Image (cartoon, coloured by chain):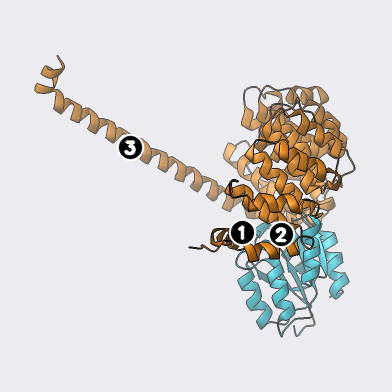
Amino acid sequence: MGDGKKRILIIEDNEILLNTMQFVLAREGYDLLLAKSGKEALSLVSDETIDLVITDLALPFANGYEIIDRIRKGNRNNQVPVIIISGYRDDNSIVEGFEVGANDYIKKPISPSELVSRVRLRIGHV
Amino acid sequence: MIRSFFEGDGWPMIVWIALVLSFMFWTACLIGICIFYYRDYRYRSHYTRIYPVLRDFIYEHVLIANTFNHFPIEKLSLDLDKRIVRKVVRQILHEFIFTIGGEKGRSMRNLFNEMGFDKEAQYEIRHSAKHVLATVRSLSDLALMQVNIQDDILKQLLGSPRVEIRVAAYKYLVQVEGEQAFDRIFAGIYGISELDALDIYQSIVLTDYVGAYRFSQWLDDSKTCAVNSLYMDLMVYYQQLDEEELWKLIMARKELRTVQKAINALGKLLARASEDQLQCLFHKEQDLNLKIEIIKAIGRLGQGKSIDLLETIFKDKNSVLVLRKHAYRSLIAQKPYSTSCLRKLDNEVESDDDKLIRYINHPMVHYF
C-alpha cells in the first residue's frame, strides 16, 4: 500500500475466473488480494485495508450476500465499494445484492474491458 | 439323477464353480476400479500439463494482443490428434468461454473453431444416428460457439426419432437464434419428458429474452402434460396470464396432471377473475389432488372471497387431513381479510385441531 496502489480483494471460487480477473487487474497496476471462500475473505477484510471488493455470490462457507452484510456491519472497510460478479441473472438476486449494500453487479460471463472500466469507475486509475 | 449328483462329486463341483465365479467377479470389479482410476489419473495429468500452456496462450493472444482470429495454434505444440488431448483442450476452452464474455469471448469462440472443434462438431451432427451422445455434445458445442448449422441438417436433427437429439436441437436453436426460434421449436415439439421440458425451460430463461412472446398460444389439450407444462412454466416465469387458454385445458380434462398444472398456473399468475370458477370447480371435483391444487390457488389469489369455503373445509372433520391442512394454509394467505376468522378458529379449536394448526405454523417442530 505504501506505493499508492489501490488494493482490490477478489472473492471467487472458480479458479479460471479468479486467475483471469487477477491477470486483467494486475496488468492495470492494482494490488490484489485473493480469496476462494467466504471464510478466507472475511479474515482478509478484518485484517487488511481494502479499496474495492469484487465478490461472487455462490461461495463455500459464506455466500456473497453474507460477506457484503458482514463488511457493511464491520468496523474496518465498512465503506468499501463492492462489485458482485455472478451467474445469477434473475432480478431478485440483483435487487437483493443492492439491498445488502453492493454498489455494482456484473453478470457472468464477464467482459475483461467492462470489468476494468467498472473498477476504474469505483476507485479510479492507479 | 439329481440325488446321485449330490451324493457323488456334485457338492465339491458346485463349490468349485462358485469359487471360480466369485474370483472372476471380484477380479472384474478390481479391473473396473483400476480402469476408472487410471482414466481419471490420465485425464488429470493431461489437464495439469495442458492448462498452464493453454491459459498463457489465451492470456497472451486473446487478452493482451487482442487477436480476433488466425491464432498461431502451432505454437501450443499440442498433439490435437490424440483423443485425450482433444478432450482436455475442449474442457479447458469450455471453461474459458463460460468465464470470458464480450469481444474477448468471441475471440475465444474463434480459437475454439480454429482448433478444429467446429468441424468435429459439424461432422458429429451429420452422423447423429450412430452416436447420440456425441451429437448432443456437438450441438452444445456449436451453440456455445454460436455457429450456424445448415438448415437441412437442423431439420433432420429436429425430426430425429431420438428424443435426446431433438431436445439438444431445441436448446441449440434457443441459444443461437433466441426468440426468433420460438415458433419453430414450439410448432414441432413432441414426445419430450418432463425433465426434457425443464431442460428447455432452463435454456430459455437463461437467455437475455425478456418475454413479449405469447406462450399460451401453443397450449393444446391434445399435447402431452410435459409439453403443456413447458408453456405454462414459461407463462409463469414471464408473468403472462391467459385465463381463457388455461381454462380450456382445465375443462378439456384430458390429463389430470395437466389440469393440476393449469390450476397451479392460475394461482401463480394471480388470475383474480377466476376465483368464482375455481370455487365451482372445487365443489364439482372428486379428485383429491385437484381439490388441493384449487385450494392452494385460491390461497395464492388472496382476495378474501373464499374465506367461508376455506373455513368450512378446515372445520369438516370428515374431510381428508391434507385438504384441511391446505385450507388452513390458504386462510393464512388470505390475511388481512382472514385475520378475524383465524383468531376465531384458534380460540374454538379442539386439541387435535390445535395440533394441526401448530404443525402448519411450525412444520419443522414435532408435536406430541
Residue at image mark 2: B332
Indicate whether B182 appears above or below B202: above
On the image, the x and y values in percent for residue B115 come to: 72, 40
- How far apart marks 3 and 1 lie (CA) works out to 55 Å
On whether disc 3 and disc 1 are found on a single subunit, the reply is yes
- Among the chains pictured, the one given orange colouring is B
On whether disc 2 and disc 3 are found on a single subunit, the reply is yes
Q: Which numbered disc, 1 or 2, marks the residue that appears first in the sequence?
A: 2
- Among the chains pictured, the one given cyan colouring is A
Q: Residue at x 68, y 70 (%)?
A: A66
Residue situated in front as seen by the camera: B62 or B161: B161
The chain that hosts pointer 1 is: B
Q: Are marks 1 and 2 in contact (CB under 8 Å)?
A: yes
Give the number of the mark in front: 3 or 1.
1
On the image, the x and y values in percent for residue B217 come to: 86, 33
On the image, the x and y values in percent for residue B297 come to: 74, 47
> Residue furthest toward the front?
B348
Q: Which numbered disc, 3 or 1, marks the residue that appears first in the sequence?
A: 3
Residue at image mark 3: B27
Q: Amino acid at mark 3?
A: Thr
Q: Which numbered disc, 2 or 3, marks the residue that appears first in the sequence?
A: 3
Q: Amino acid at mark 1?
A: Ile
Label 2 Cα neighbours within 10 Å, binned few <14 / some 14-19 / many ≥20: many
Residue at image mark 1: B360
Residue situated in front as seen by the camera: B90 or A53: A53
Residue situated in front as seen by the camera: A37 or B189: B189
- Residue B324 visible in the shown view: yes
The chain that hosts pointer 2 is: B
